[in-house]
């Protein structure tokens, strides 16, 4: 019995097909090398996903950024920065700009404006506090917990939109 009888015959790739595939492979490999060496998360999938590319020391710290707000109705709540649906920006964007926000807290005006635009039916933000939960580890277990507050900014009620970057 001839098992090869019904099998279709393969044609070798043409020179153009081979060149196209090798060229595509070279471009993808070049982007991967560039993204890994000099890129950041914006270049994903050719850049590193840096939030996953580190190891926590068993005697180190785990830090988690948070944003809390006092609202016009007198309540207080932590804003959801796990995605951009709550305040218009996500955690990674805030973490990337944290040094600028600490230096110029009025940059938080964009969060207040985004909150109002995204949630017109909810009370406006009156004060925004940016901080970080810190869990200290000893031998891989929680030994202590604290909160570090980085900055506070009072929202101007009913004020005109504020340019978050002073000139």
Image (cartoon, rainbow, N blue to C red):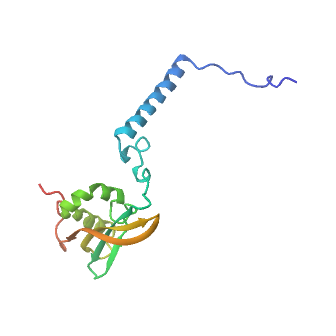
Residue situated in front as seen by the camera: 14 or 63: 63
Q: Residue at x 50, y 21 (%)?
A: 19
Q: Is residue 163 left or right of residue 145?
A: left
Q: Residue at x 32, y 56 (%)?
A: 93
Q: Residue 117: x percent and y percent?
A: 29, 66
Q: Residue 51: x percent and y percent?
A: 41, 53
* Quarter of the rendering containing residue 151: bottom left
Residue situated in front as seen by the camera: 77 or 38: 38
In this view, the residue farthest toward the right is: 1
Residue situated in front as seen by the camera: 119 or 97: 97
Q: Residue 132: x percent and y percent?
A: 32, 67
- The quarter of the picture where the N terminus appears is top right
Residue situated in front as seen by the camera: 83 or 9: 83
In this view, the residue farthest toward the top is: 15
The reply to whether residue 134 is visible in this rendering is yes
Q: Residue at x 39, y 72 (%)?
A: 144
Q: Residue 5: x percent and y percent?
A: 80, 22
In this view, the residue farthest toward the left is: 167
Q: Residue at x 42, y 58 (%)?
A: 57
Q: Is residue 33 left or right of residue 113?
A: right
């Amino acid at each position: 019995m001839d098992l090869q009888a019904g099998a279709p015959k393969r044609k070798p790739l043409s020179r153009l097909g081979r060149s196209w595939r090798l060229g595509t492979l070279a471009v993808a490999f070049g982007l991967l090398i560039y993204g890994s060496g000099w890129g950041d998360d914006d270049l994903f999938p050719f850049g590193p996903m840096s939030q996953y590319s580190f190891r926590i020391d068993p005697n180190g710290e785990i830090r988690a950024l948070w944003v809390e707000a006092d609202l016009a109705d007198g309540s207080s709540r932590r804003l959801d920065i796990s995605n951009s649906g709550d305040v218009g920006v996500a955690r990674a964007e805030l973490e990337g700009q944290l040094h600028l926000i600490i230096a110029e807290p009025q940059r938080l005006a964009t969060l207040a404006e985004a909150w109002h635009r995204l949630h017109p039916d909810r009370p406006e933000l009156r004060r925004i506090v940016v901080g970080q939960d810190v869990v200290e580890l000893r031998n891989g277990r929680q030994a202590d917990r604290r909160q570090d507050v980085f900055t506070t900014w009072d929202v101007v009620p009913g004020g005109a939109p504020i340019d978050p970057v002073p000139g």
